[in-house]
Image (spheres, helix red, strand yellow):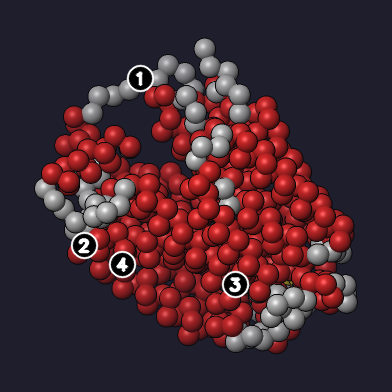
Amino acid sequence: MSETIEKTIVKDVQTKKNHTGPFLIMVALFFVVGFLTVVNQQFQVPLKGAFLGNAGEIKDALATMLTFAFFLGYPATSGIGAKWVENKGYKMTLVNGLIMLVFGLGIFELSAWSNSMLPSVSLAGGEVPLAFFVFLIGSFVVGCALAILQIVINPYLTACIVPGTTAVTRMSIGGSSNSTGTTLAPLFVTYIVFAGAEASDVQIGDIYIPLGALLAFVAVLAFIIPKLNLPNIGSQEEKEDAEPVKLDKSVWSFSHLKLGVVAIFMYVGVEVCVGANLGLYIEQLIEKGEFPDAVKLLWFDGKSVAILPAIYWFSMLVGRLCGSFLSKIAGTTQLLVTAGGATVLVIAGMLTANPWLLVAVGLLHSIMWGAIFALAIDKLGPYTSKGSGALMIGVVGGALMPLFQGILASSLGSWDMTWFLVIAGELYLVYYALVGYKHNLD
């Protein structure tokens, strides 16, 4: 794909094309991807109050099902998205992804509308409204849509010709936009969608107008995209000119790639565990009167659980902006230092019940993805594209690990000891930085 994009860039430079407008649309879409990813996670706390008040001991596990359903969309549709790109092209795949996103947001609205009409079901000694499961379906569809969008947004960010920028600069701008969306999402959920109400006072009908506005915005984008002059990535002519590459063995024969898939699984898992479940942990500390006075700093009064998750995602934005200055530091060193530091912070946060230490982990998580990805595909040669695709399987860690943590919290009756799961994930990343990245190449 990289050679195809380079050909496109050369052709566009020669014809003096300017894709500033389409580029800004892609930047906006990358914002939407990050924004909705974290919006879905931050629905866990308010929807636990709106839907799961009578769910009994399994309400924490059920709340984390929102994140599980969302990230399940990534492995479910990555193959579909690739086929759409091959058969329909990048532009129509982008449009189809936006249409799917409209449907997902519509299912969220349907969940709120049907809450008063659908009955509840008995589950593990508690009562769970069927409308909650409708919302889970919406989370899954939104996750599927965002997975498809990301397949095409990254190549377009690279291929769009914008005067005064390079491909690396454009990717950095897109990443910063994505992180800005993740930072604002917790505040949007708490202060815009639910108007600062405490979890016990949340009404599911509050989502109508804010999510309806998002739905309308995405629908407008789906209407505009076909009219844009986007770079022609992967045209049929280029496919015919390309020489097929014969691969003699399975991409899974490379040990550093296989262990890299596990590393991506662990990385995405621990990142989402902190970002998604931090609010539920803070809620528990407040309910039990265990919220440390030392934590009540700045404007944070110990009541609004959205502030610290927002700062966590903001710290990742800061880390990614600063990450460009670390290009001369080896990926193994970057991963070892950040994973080791994250391990120490999570242990300290767990022992002291200080959520601020968990927030600080975001600064370290911010640069792990790039380091892991680079190490895992290093020296794969003609297997690089297949290796990159294999690594995306690891994203399912964002579905499974937060769910496992929620199940542990429900089983133990507390979030306190569940952070051992995150510590285990961080320690694996330390192992990968020390040993797992090494090649078994001939």
| Residue, disc 2 | 228
Name the quadrant containing residue 405: bottom right
| Residue, disc 4 | 222
* Dot label at residue 246: 1
- N-terminal label among 1 and 2: 2
Residue type at mark 1 is Lys
Q: Give the CA distance from mark 1 to mark 4.
A: 38 Å
Tag 3 secondary structure: helix
Q: Position of residue 16 (x, y in %)?
A: 13, 51
Q: Give the CA distance from mark 3 to mark 1.
A: 47 Å
| Total numbered circles | 4
- Discs 3, 1 touching: Cβ within 8 Å: no
Q: Position of residue 281 (x, y in %)?
A: 77, 66
Residue type at mark 4 is Ala
| Residue at 49% across, 81% down | 210
Is residue 96 visible to the viewer in this orientation of the structure? no
Residue type at mark 3 is Pro
